[in-house]
Image (tube, rainbow, N blue to C red):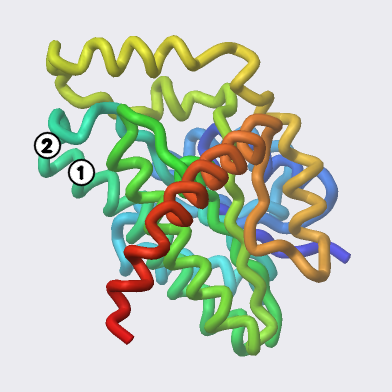
Amino acid sequence: MSKTIFISGASRGFGKIWAEAFLKRGDKVAATARNLDSLKDLVQQYGDAILPIKLNVNSREESFNAVKKAHDHFGKIDVLINNAGYGLFGTIEETTEQEARDQIETNVFGLLWLTQAVVPLMRKQGSGHIIQVSSALGVATLPVLGIYNASKFAVEGLSETLAAEVKGFGINVTLVEPNGFATDWGGASAIHTQPMKEYEPVKAAFQAGLTDDAFGVPAATVSAILKLVDTKNPPLRLFLGKVALPWIKQVYQERLATWEEWQDIAVAAHGK
């Protein structure tokens, strides 16, 4: 049975790849982008199965209107995929106020507005699946991506809470956490801070860790996303790529060891 998918940030990268995969198998797709020219090829190929919607997710009003337009057009929204977002590269000290605010505005508030818009519709339907495109960097961090890390940590906390709140309405929530993939997330889509020479060694170490093998093939994620959308009991978290889980396991082993080391002090701080 075909599904109706609402996906933000569908102009390129994961968003466009997944939108096309849904269309190819017969689903209906409401695809948003800031520039609708980027969706012309999908419209020409799939016609009425795709509804292109111009959207700046930073606008709460536009986000609510976009969800309403998609729902009015297709009659339902089975799945929301919050994919819109971008990377901000730069150290914490280098980041300007506007750069930080813009990053949080898009990656966190943009996701929040679409989520808030779709929940009432899914609650009325008694079913739905909200998929939040987070990152492995929402679970552990790397230097030079501090504000991006922070935005994805916020998405993690927001979405885990949401999952508990809407489960009783028949709505599932999944956080998709990719490791690095060879999209233009780190290229044309990225923003870079004004560099400071003091951080050149940190950035050189960061770049040295970016081996080709660390980056997955974007098109290879399609089967995982289709399976995620089709499963009756989707997980709260799904890592994408072979690098993410081993890295996170290592990080958490180190965290647990430190927490255990300080546990006596922590217990004493309880006071009773």
Identified at 70% across, 54% down, the residue is 48
**Horizontally, is 213 left or right of 143 in the view?**
right
Q: Which mark is residue 37?
A: none
Residue 190 position within the rendered picture, expressed as x and y whole percent measured from the top left = 36, 28
Up/down of 256 relative to 200, above or below: below
Q: Which mark is residue 100?
A: 1
Label 1's element? Answer: helix
Q: Which mark is residue 96?
A: 2
Up/down of 125 relative to 176, above or below: below
- For label 2, count other residues whose C-alpha is less than 10 Å away and answer few (under 14), some (14-19) or many (20+): few
Circles 1 and 2: CB atoms closer than 8 Å: yes
**Horizontally, is 60 left or right of 101 in the view?**
right
Up/down of 53 relative to 136, above or below: below
- For label 1, count other residues whose C-alpha is less than 10 Å away and answer few (under 14), some (14-19) or many (20+): some
**Horizontally, is 6 left or right of 87 in the view?**
right
- Nearer-the-camera pick, 267 or 157: 267
Label 2's element? Answer: loop
Identified at 44% across, 55% down, the residue is 259
Residue at the right extreme, as displayed: 1
Q: How many marks?
A: 2
Q: Quadrant of residue 58?
A: bottom left
Q: CA distance from mark 1 to mark 2?
A: 6 Å
Up/down of 227 relative to 244, above or below: below
Q: Is residue 15 visible?
A: no
